[in-house]
Image: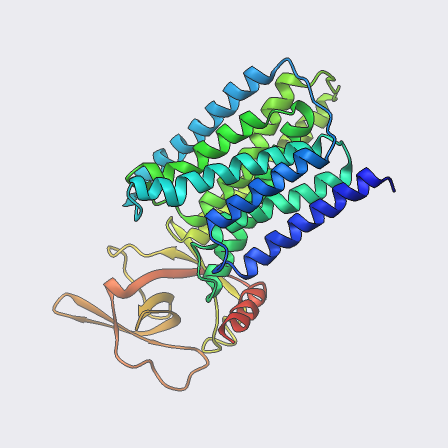
């Protein structure tokens, strides 16, 4: 291996190790320290690494397009906010915000994109892989301080919203850097899609899984648009293959959207993992149930299995008796595997939905992860 290659791989490895170290000790390394370290690493890389300059006649157009894509991304979130609602940002725009959040974020974004450009200009596959890992870690670090990973929900949020989305975004950034060498376009896009939460006083309250899906799908859409506009080699595809690809893509998007809609529990149907054995025989521990959200105008019949709130816990039990007292309905419930009826009764406002379907076994992974985090 040439000395230059060895030097590159050692530097990249050191960067990945540092970033992993900051994740495990995130309470020590704040954004300002990370920004300073990345700046130092950028300067060292500029001094030690020989890079080839990628010339592209489309750089101005790509910069404008990425700026537009960034604005569209933020606009889509705020349009969704009309349906989901908004919340007031906990961080008000001020000098303190600029010094402690905006400047470190911008420095990290600029330094990381210059570093990406330096190493990916060498056009080696190993560099692309190491840069993808390093840049995904950087984006993870930027968000990790927001989450306390003490619960399963925090873990799923980290994995779904940050890591997978960061991988999708950085695959796009790697592609733009390798093909066009345009770091400026990526920097503008990243600043727009990151900084709005520190500038605008209200933030769209879009469900976390939907945000995750958007952040994973949107970079792929941008990639396809850029490929369609600027790729010189046009691939000839038969009508049959085009139809097949379109059908597969459409099905994948539909399935992904259905999963988001169900997991979010904010639409007509919701999903829950069964964590107890109180309904064993009918619904077993580890099954996932699909329920239809309850409308208070509907009548709940004896024998139906319902999802309801009791002591801040969601319970899935069968209705064994219905009583109407002066127009007020009271539902008495019991788990099929329990010998005794549940204490007290359930009223209409406590009912979340009616169970429509069960999917066996696939909730065991969630239960196992929950046990790990509880321990």
User: Tell me, what colour scheme is on the image?
Assistant: rainbow
Q: Is residue 360 left or right of residue 98?
A: right
Report whether 143 appears left or right of 345: right
Q: Residue at x 45, y 51 (%)?
A: 262
So how many labels did they put on this image? Answer: 0
Q: Between 47 and 160, which is closer to the camera in this rendering?
A: 47
| Of the pair 96 and 274, the residue shown nearer to us | 96
Residue 120, position in %: x, y? 70, 33
User: Could you tell me which residue is drawn at 60 percent across and 33 percent down?
Assistant: 114
In the rendered image, residue 183, in percent from the top left (x then y), is placed at 58, 28
Asked whether 43 or 107 is in front, the reply is: 43
In this view of the protein, can residue 259 be seen by the observer? no
Quarter of the image where the N terminus is located: top right
The answer to which image quadrant residue 93 occupies is top left
Up/down of 342 relative to 238, above or below: below
Q: Is residue 266 visible?
A: yes
- Position of 268 relative to 326 (above/below): above
Left or right placement of residue 132 versus residue 260 in this view:
right
Residue drawn at the location 61% of the way across and 55% of the way down = 20
- Image x and y of residue 261, in percent: 44, 47
Residue at the extreme right:
1
Outermost residue toward the top?
57
Return the residue found at the far bottom.
339
Point out residue 34 in the picture as x, y percentages from the top left corner: 52, 48
- Residue for point 48% across, 26% down: 69
Horizontal side, residue 202 vs residue 114: left or right = left
Please identify the quarter of the rendering in which residue 339 is found. Answer: bottom left
């Amino acid at each position: 291996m040439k000395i230059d290659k060895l030097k590159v791989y050692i530097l990249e490895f050191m960067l990945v190790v540092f970033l992993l170290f900051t994740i495990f000790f995130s309470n020590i390394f704040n954004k300002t320290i990370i920004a300073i370290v990345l700046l130092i690493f950028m300067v060292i890389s500029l001094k030690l690494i020989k890079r080839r300059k990628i010339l592209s006649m489309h750089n101005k157009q790509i910069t404008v397009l990425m700026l537009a894509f960034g604005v569209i991304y933020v606009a889509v979130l705020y349009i969704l906010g009309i349906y989901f609602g908004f919340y007031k940002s906990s961080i008000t725009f001020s000098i303190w915000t600029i010094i402690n959040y905006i400047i470190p974020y911008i420095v990290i974004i600029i330094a990381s994109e210059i570093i990406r450009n330096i190493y990916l200009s060498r056009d080696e596959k190993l560099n692309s892989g190491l840069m993808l890992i390093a840049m995904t870690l950087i984006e993870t670090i930027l968000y990790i301080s927001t989450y306390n990973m003490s619960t399963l929900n925090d873990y799923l949020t980290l994995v779904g919203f940050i890591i997978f989305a960061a991988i999708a975004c950085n695959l796009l950034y790697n592609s733009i850097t390798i093909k066009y060498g345009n770091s400026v376009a990526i920097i503008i896009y990243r600043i727009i899609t990151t900084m709005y939460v520190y500038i605008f006083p209200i933030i769209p309250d879009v469900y976390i899984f939907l945000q995750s899906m958007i952040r994973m799908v949107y970079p792929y859409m941008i990639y396809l648009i850029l490929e369609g506009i600027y790729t010189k080699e046009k691939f000839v595809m038969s009508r049959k293959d085009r139809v097949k690809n379109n059908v597969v893509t459409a099905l994948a998007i539909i399935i992904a959207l259905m999963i988001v809609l169900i997991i979010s529990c904010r639409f007509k149907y919701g999903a829950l993992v069964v964590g107890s054995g109180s309904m064993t025989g009918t619904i077993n521990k580890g099954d996932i149930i699909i329920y239809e959200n309850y409308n208070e105008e509907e009548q709940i019949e004896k024998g139906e299995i319902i999802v309801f709130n009791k002591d801040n816990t969601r319970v899935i039990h069968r209705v064994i008796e219905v009583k109407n007292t002066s127009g007020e309905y009271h539902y008495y419930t019991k788990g099929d595997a329990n010998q005794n009826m549940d204490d007290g009764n359930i009223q209409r406002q406590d009912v979340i939905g009616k169970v429509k379907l069960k999917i066996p076994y696939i909730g065991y992974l969630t239960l196992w992860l929950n046990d790990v985090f509880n321990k």
